[in-house]
Image (cartoon, rainbow, N blue to C red):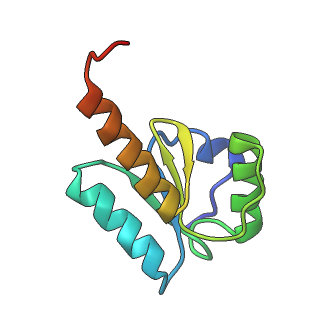
Amino acid sequence: MSRMTIEELHQFQNLVITQPNCPYCVRAKAILDDRGTDYTTLVLGQHLEKTEMVTFIEQVANTTVRTVPQIILDGKYIGGHDDLVAFLERQVEADALGDFEL
């Protein structure tokens, strides 16, 4: 398979960048699967190189990363597995408050 360009990476709304034998990648994808979230998985070394991932995330989030998974949802940078869990917990908490106002 051909490598992804940075321009092509920007086209994904829901993206999980992984690598083989990564337990946190498996967990993050399982969380998204359980929620019924459609996403594209790109594997380092198959679809893109690590340097391409680093450059892409630097452009998207203005931060340097070296680990996987790296997750984009609705075109927004989420981060890794722990960031995904925290993001989803914040969503649940916000939903629980509903229309609550002070």
Between 82 and 7, the one nearer to me in the picture: 82
Residue 48, percent from left and from top: 64, 65
Going by the picture, which residue comes out furthest to the front? 102
Going by the picture, which residue comes out furthest to the bottom? 21
Between 92 and 26, the one nearer to me in the picture: 92
Residue 16, percent from left and from top: 48, 58
Count of residue discs: 0
Q: Is residue 98 left or right of residue 21?
A: left
Going by the picture, which residue comes out furthest to the top? 102
Between 97 and 36, the one nearer to me in the picture: 97
Residue positioned 54% across, 61% down in the render:
80
The answer to which image quadrant residue 52 occupies is bottom right
Residue positioned 37% across, 47% down in the render:
88
Residue positioned 30% across, 41% down in the render:
92
Residue 100, percent from left and from top: 29, 17
Residue 89, percent from left and from top: 36, 48
Placement of 82 over or under 101, stated as above or below: below
In which quadrant of the rendered image does the N terminus lie? bottom right
